[in-house]
Image (tube, helix red, strand yellow):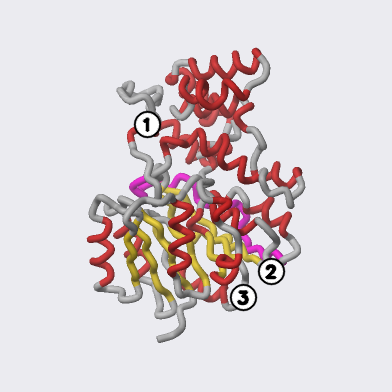
Amino acid sequence: MNPIKISICIATRNRGAFIGATLESIIEQATDEVEIVVLDGASTDNTEEVVHGYQQRFPRLRYFRQQAAMGVDRDFATVVDLADGEYCWLFCDDDLFKPGAIQIVLDAIRDGYALIIVNSEVRNANLSTLLQPRRWLPTMDRIYESNESDLLFADVGDCLTFIGGVIIKKKLWVTREKERYFGSLFVHVGVIFQQPLPEDALMIANPLISIRYGNASWLAKTFEIWMFKWPSLVWSFANFPESVRCRVCDKEPWRNPKRLLYYRATGAYTKREYRELLKERLESPWAQFVSGAIAHLPGRIANLIVSIYYMVVQSPSEHGVSLSDLKNGPFCFWKLPTKHRTAFQQQPVMSTGSQRPSSASNRTNL
């Protein structure tokens, strides 16, 4: 047996319907330098049974079950600790590897990078429709030297909202602080950017992953994540200039009425979010009025306005993810009204599992 070069680390919970396809896409191209490590955050469905079935085919698939859900950040920290590989590929439990992905990364790690980030394509929840051909627009691979931390963060920070594209040296991961980032939903970003990398990083421009968009386990908290949690983490990195952090995300995106209108159109921003998350943060009566008015705007009208904008003013081919959110939300203007308050709340929020707060819709260009 060759030493394990890559451990594909998956934190999961209640993904029995999807994790089999994920494992299939890995096993069919894995070499004897690859292992799979699955950490189950106390699933109540058939996840354990599905994984055990694949263990019969792939002996380097190791499964660990926790007694209770501990949260996605803790789970990914734990699954990396359990890994034996020189590198750990942090992967989601419902996405797929594209053919040849593992060999491309195996070839790349022989150059000793501290970090490799791979591009991905975005598809709808059943993978039948391509929404975004590449999340990272450049078409050429890029090497970032260890002294180019600012450029690395500015260029790829937004891409790293998707954890599945991260391959990191295990010895680097284990030496860095993690507990500070538990609860952020982006522990990997904290590990990578808390201080400069000791070696170069590589960004692979060719998409190696198919993201199953619209299937994430955190959808009920979409507004809170993108308006507060993600900006709070990005702006906590005081070692980067403000100009660099601005390129990753706005410091307080919730102050932007256009952002609020977009989230109202998709069903993620309602009177409850305004009352519980925004009202006390807004200093001026005018800001309170505007934000409150958007929260009270009929959702189907908001959806019509924003949909027309994306279909007419913006290029639909560049905003397939945003249009998908608008179409599949509860306020889609050409569909019958839903009885549910929001489409995002039709799914329970899992403590662990697919970590994919990622898409272009999170930083809408409206």
Q: Is residue 117 above or below residue 243?
A: below
Disc 3 residue type (three-letter): Gly
Image quadrant containing the C terminus: top right
Residue tagged 2: 198
Q: Is residue 148 above or below residue 273?
A: below
- In x, y percent, where is residue 37? 39, 67
Residue tagged 3: 112
State the residue at coordinates (65%, 13%).
Answer: 285
Instruction: Give the label, 2 or 1, closer to the camera.
Output: 2
Q: CA distance from mark 2 to mark 1?
A: 43 Å
Image quadrant containing the N terminus: bottom left
Q: CA distance from mark 3 to mark 2?
A: 11 Å
Would residue 314 be seen by someone viewing this image from the given angle? yes
Residue nearest the observer in this picture, 274 or 82: 82
Residue nearest the observer in this picture, 112 or 302: 112
Circle 2: element type: loop
Residue count near mark 1 (Cα–Cα under 10 Å), binned few <14, some 14–19, many ≥20: some
Disc 1 residue type (three-letter): Ala
Residue tagged 1: 343
Residue nearest the observer in this picture, 127 or 33: 33
- In x, y percent, where is residue 188? 55, 56
Would residue 135 be seen by someone viewing this image from the given angle? no
- In x, y percent, where is residue 344? 39, 34
- In x, y percent, where is residue 83? 44, 70
Q: Is residue 363 above or below residue 71?
A: above
